[in-house]
Structure formats: structure tokens, C-alpha cells
Image (tube, helix red, strand yellow):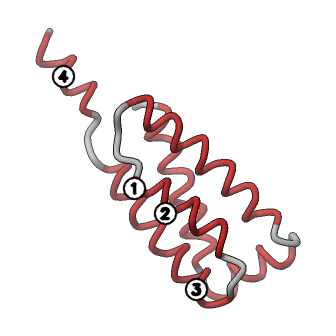
């Protein structure tokens, strides 16, 4: 499993956690919006590694947008949930590089 795929699972799980209505808001507000900055950095790293691996970057781009606008109460919750879905769907897709390597062997 590639590093970008692992980061998609991790960032997708964290986005799902932040998307839980009261719990996510408590985490974000309780830590003074620092989780949004951490998630922004994580999404940027995931985006760069996914681009390098030639994978789908939709979830990472949506996560970056989410981290920038998630301070808006209900919009943030919906965006966290959407980001989590897109990231986990991207992470569940098979690696094309690994698939090609098996066919060559």
C-alpha cells in the first residue's frame, strides 16, 4: 500500500471524526481551530504524494477547501463529511502502479 493511500485513509478518518455534529465542533473550537490547520497541512501533503503517485486528488482538494471554510458552523460539518467520503472512496480504489507491476511479472 502506497504512502498516499495510507494518508488518504488517515485524513478520511479524521475528517469523518470532525464531521460528527457536536463532537467535531467541540474538538475544533476546544483546540482553537488548530485542528483545521493540521488538517490543511495533512491534505496538502496527501495531495503532493498522490500527485506524485499518479492517483486521484479529488478528495485531497476537497479536504483543502474544507480546511479553509470549516470555521462556518453547518457548512464545515457538511464539508467534513463530504471530504471523508471522497477520501475514503479514493483510498479504497486499487493502486494502478501495483496492478501494472503484477501484470509485468
When the figure is inspected, residue 71 is found, relative to residue 56, above or below; the finding is below
Quadrant in the picture for the C terminus:
top left
Q: Residues within 10 Å of mark 1 (few under 14, many from 20)?
A: few
Q: Residues within 10 Å of mark 3 (few under 14, many from 20)?
A: few
What secondary structure is marked by label 3? helix
Along the polypeptide, which appears first: circle 4 or circle 3? 3
Residue at image location 43% in from the left, 40% down from the top: 5
Q: Quadrant of residue 50?
A: top left
The x and y percentages for residue 34 are 82, 63
Question: Left of 82 or right of it: where is 98?
Answer: left
Q: Quadrant of residue 80?
A: bottom right
Residue at image location 24% in from the left, 32% down from the top: 96
Eye-nearest disc, 4 or 3: 3
Residue tagged by mark 3?
75
Residue tagged by mark 1?
58
Residue tagged by mark 2?
62
Q: Which disc is residue 15 wearing? A: none
Residue tagged by mark 4?
100
Q: Residues within 10 Å of mark 2 (few under 14, many from 20)?
A: some
The x and y percentages for residue 76 are 61, 80
Amino acid at each position: 500500500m502506497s504512502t498516499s493511500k495510507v494518508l488518504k485513509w488517515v485524513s478520511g478518518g479524521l475528517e469523518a471524526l470532525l464531521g460528527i455534529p457536536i463532537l467535531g465542533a467541540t474538538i475544533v473550537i476546544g483546540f482553537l481551530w488548530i485542528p483545521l490547520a493540521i488538517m490543511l497541512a495533512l491534505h496538502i501533503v496527501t495531495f503532493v504524494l498522490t500527485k506524485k503517485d499518479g492517483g486521484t486528488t479529488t478528495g485531497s482538494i476537497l479536504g483543502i477547501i474544507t480546511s479553509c471554510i470549516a470555521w462556518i458552523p453547518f457548512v464545515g460539518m457538511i464539508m467534513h463529511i463530504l471530504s471523508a467520503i471522497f477520501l475514503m472512496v479514493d483510498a479504497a480504489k486499487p493502486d494502478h502502479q501495483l496492478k501494472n507491476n503484477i501484470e509485468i511479472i
